[in-house]
Amino acid sequence: MNPDVADAIPRLTEAGILPPEAAPRLLRVARRELVSVRRELRFVLYLGVLLLTGGVGLLVKENLDRIGPVAIAAGIGLAAAAALFWVWRVAPPFSRGEAASPNLAFDYMLLLGVLLVAADLAYIEVQLSPLGANWPWHFLIVSLLAAAAAVRFDSRIVFSLALASFAAWRGVSVARFGADVLDASGAVRWNALACGVFFILLGLVLRHAGFKAHFEPVAVHLGWLLVLGGLASGIGEENWPAWAGALLLVGMGLAVGAFRFRRFPLFAYGVIGGYLGLTRFIFAGDEVLGCFWISFSAILIVLGLVFAQRRMREPLE
Amino acid sequence: MRPDAAEADRNAAVRKAARAWKKAGVIDDAALAKIEAACPDDRVRVGPVFRVLLFIFTLVGINAGFGFILLFFSDAGEYAFATLALVVGAGLVFLTELQTGLFKRAQGGTEAATSFAALGFLAGGSTWIFSEMMGVSFDDVLLAELILLTLLCAAAAWRWGYPFYAAVSVATLLGVLAHLPAARLFWIALAVLAAPVLLRLEDSPRLPPALRASATAALVTALAGLYIAVNLQSFDLG
């Protein structure tokens, strides 16, 4: 129960601020007589999708000898087709802009269908190797299919999956980047940077064209993370000054731009990236200077952030 | 919690509900403005992104500053670290009080960071005293620290209204009880005895929202302890 809100509702209704016809329902919500489980349902649906796709992988791994590759591929394919068929049946007509989901499960059934398609393609590739030495191209196929599904059925989750698959095709996977980020080869780093720039431009084009403009934050955020991550991966290399300098300049530029356009998460990325770049230069010196720098600079950053947030006025929720 | 902070917390809950009503279309902008005028907010608050940034950089600054000062006392012997940690911890408690009191910060990031660091330094300094200066065994140091953290976090949750500290307090209390014979029974007893009290506190109009949330966090942690205590796997693992 929320006693403060429950106390306030009658007062606000008497004062004429709340419409009297709305008060009973709001009071029921405040007294927890009416409880929304939307968030919990979404969480359970998402968890269900992850468990199902994980379970499919485990089932395949443990029963490969007994079931046989063709039966497995057909089974996963049928499950994917069933999920996508349901999505197709209930989906609203295509729209260039944002389309409301017809129900709570829609996005998650679409995600399940696309993930099962991806799993099926991966399984076929492993078992039958139709692409041979060009096996990474299967990521591009998954990316294009996911992108098409995302655009047709207006799903940001599936759009992010499309972008991640594209990055994987270019040789940048989350696991690999996390494990080898400090030893990342030049090819991986340059791929990450190129992917990042591509995603940023894609987001800007989508917004400018007014075509699925609400996908722009997905593309831009992932793009900037790839760019900053790619630059940061170079600060442990021999030619670290170039990478640290680039990280500093790009981070600062991003922070300034995000400040101007009140893009709060991008502002955070820029501040952290720029700070990392600058700190790398200071840490090339001695440890006393390093400790002093970090404590002094952190205080300056805090003061700067207090100033910035007064100008940017980020909403509380 | 301070009375003024508690009042501000209550007003913030009504304002938050009003924003949700506006989003649902129940009220318009004019009504929202009237509600915000009727339930004024005198606290300095920031949005979630800035809150996280301010928290991170404040914590980085405090720890780096401590490291920097410690460099000048590196030859002062084993007392230096513990004394410095306790002094800094006490100073951070004072700083947190200043921010939440005089500067009226709430959801500001910096006061959460100083409170977190305060608890860390007080716990760290006392651990050093117990283990290095008093030569207490590891098990006894652990028990002493768990008791200390239980009390510190409970006090922090009560004074500053952070549900996280309430959860940690109960978790460390479970750790203390784990040292007792028949620990499993104590874990079950804690949950069974505390649940009715915490459930009432969750809905109590006498408590501001932050302390009600702390009661919820404490309840969830106690119930997690109950689950672990009765879970078959915990029997297998001993």
Image (spheres, helix red, strand yellow):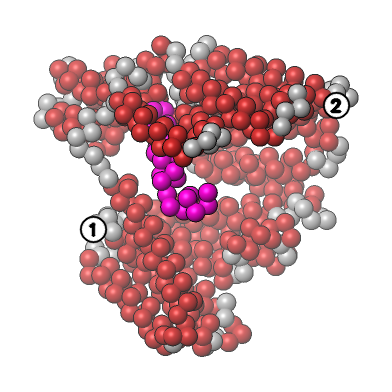
View extreme (right): residue = B75
**Residue A80 appears in view:** yes
Instruction: Please tell me the numbered disc located at residue B74.
Output: 2
Residue A254 colored in magenta in the image: no
Chain under numbered label 1? A
- The nearer-to-camera label among 1 and 2 is 2
Give the number of callouts.
2
In the rendered view, tell whether residue A270 sits above or below residue A172. Answer: above
Q: Amino acid at mark 1?
A: Pro
Chain under numbered label 2? B
Instruction: Please tell me the numbered disc located at residue B36.
Output: none
Dot 2: what SS? Answer: loop
Measured from the top left, where is residue B98 in percent x and y?
A: 56, 14
Give the left or right position of residue A311, taking residue B4 as reference.
Answer: right
Instruction: Please tell me the numbered disc located at residue A102.
Output: 1
**Residue A149 appears in view:** no
Specify few, some or many for label 2: CA neighbours under 10 Å numbering under 14, 14-19, or 20 or more.
few
Q: Main secondary structure of the magenta part?
A: helix
Q: Amino acid at mark 2?
A: Ser
Residue at 78%, 24% in the rendered image: B133
Q: Is there CB contact under 8 Å for labels 1 and 2?
A: no
Magenta segment, which residues?
B213-238
In the rendered view, tell whether residue A75 sits above or below residue B43. Answer: below
